[in-house]
Image: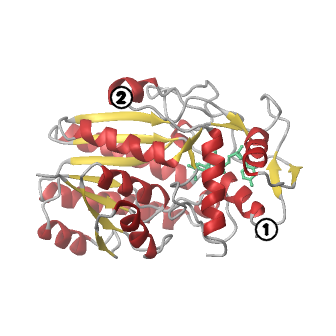
Amino acid sequence: MNKTILVTGGLGYIGSHTCVELLNNNYNVIVIDNLSNSKESVKDNIEAITGKKIIFYNVSVCDMEKIRDIFRKSKIDAVIHFAGYKAVGESVMKPLLYYQNNIDSTLVLCQVMNEFNCKKLIFSSSATVYGNNTNVPFREDYKVGGTTNPYGTSKLFIEHILNDLYISDNEWGITILRYFNPIGAHKSGLIGENPNGIPNNLMPYISKVAVGELKELSIFGNDYDTVDGTGVRDYIHVVDLANGHVKALSKLLDNKGVSIYNLGTGKGYSVLEIVNAFIKENKINIPYKIVSRRSGDVAVSYADSTKAKKELGWMPIYGIEDMVRDSYNFYRNNKND
Ligand code: UD1
């Protein structure tokens, strides 16, 4: 019998790509998404790519009664919890909203999972939990903390909550995945990252400049101690990231305990290297100017991803050219969407 996986936030950027890879690997998929930062049409696009159906509920994960109903209707083998607010700047303006939504949804979900004896959970965490640690590459056993905004702190708190949950009940299997910088999109151009308004993150911003929706990119600082003075990050193709979830799930289904994995390529690129790769691969100019540093940014962040490679047998296969090409392809297909 195929296993059934509940995916919260399954119509979002990483969630939608993960649904595709789960379906490609013959899992049944149930999605909960309240469309706060996604569109219902993403469901059709996931189904068009895979030729398979998903069950979709337009429900908030904070709504305990409705989550119970979903568990009553289907036998769920494991949950992947993507749903959450993720805009760093907004989290500084609205800390209560971010803590309430991100933490409450996780508490509701874990409580209902407990009631239905479904104790396998994958949680979307972030490299942001390494705070302003400068000792790259980041390893999973490093001390976490020192997060610079409520979004990051909500991820950190949830990691602590999940650890405590396991201490209280050793029947749980919990996998925490710390994402580095996902970019790119499915090669079909049907799903990708499409944030509302002016993007905060680098690749959506570059892509919007490329399609003429924004005038020029501002590069935040060129005086860091890096190869060319601009910030260095570990960019990872979202399809590789999605496949990391499939590998993590397959291990989790047979295991208990808390496991933490970095999902990054282990290689850092500077902002200028990304801009130049985008220009070269897509043969389109990206006007940019250098401005002052953005507060809260670290100079360098990249993963030591040997643990995921060794224990999950996961290996990212896409390079930087694939990432910048697929990002642009998605934006061209979804201009002004
Ligand atoms: C940010 C968040 C992180 C979150 C991640 C995904 C911070 C401190 N970190 O990571 O918590 O998990 O997004 O949402 O906000 N850059 C520019 N110009 C731009 C945008 C970005 O130069 O218009 C530079 C940044 O200074 C950085 C790099 O590009 O050096 C990547 O930035 P971004 O895509 O925002 O990701 P992070 O800051 O790494």
Describe residue 171's horizontal placement relative to residue 210 as left or right: left
Describe residue 130's horizontal placement relative to residue 102 as left or right: right
Give the residue at x 85% y 39%.
Answer: 222
Q: Where's residue 120, x and y in %?
A: 22, 46
Describe residue 292's horizontal placement relative to residue 159 as left or right: right
**Gap in angstroms between the C-alphas marked 1 and 2:** 41 Å
* Nearest to N terminus: mark 1 or mark 2: 1
Residue pointed to by mark 2: 313
Q: Where's residue 248, x and y in %?
A: 32, 39
Q: Where's residue 19, x and y in %?
A: 36, 57
Name the kind of residue labelled 1 in the image. Answer: Gly
Name the kind of residue labelled 2 in the image. Answer: Gly
- Label 1 crowd (10 A; few <14 / some 14-19 / many >=20): few
Would you say the beta carbon of the disc 1 residue lies within 8 angstroms of ligand 1? Answer: no
Q: Where's residue 272, x and y in %?
A: 79, 41
Residue 189 visible in the picture: yes
Which of the 4 quarters of the picture holds residue 110?
bottom left
Give the residue at x 25% y 35%.
Answer: 251
Describe residue 113's horizontal placement relative to residue 192 as left or right: left
**Marks 2 and 1: in contact by CB < 8 Å?**
no
Which of the 4 quarters of the picture holds residue 204?
bottom right
Q: Quadrant of the C terminus?
A: bottom right
Of residues 251 and 223, the one nearer the viewer is: 251
Residue pointed to by mark 1: 212
Q: Secondary structure at mark 1?
A: loop
Of residues 215 and 324, the one nearer the viewer is: 324
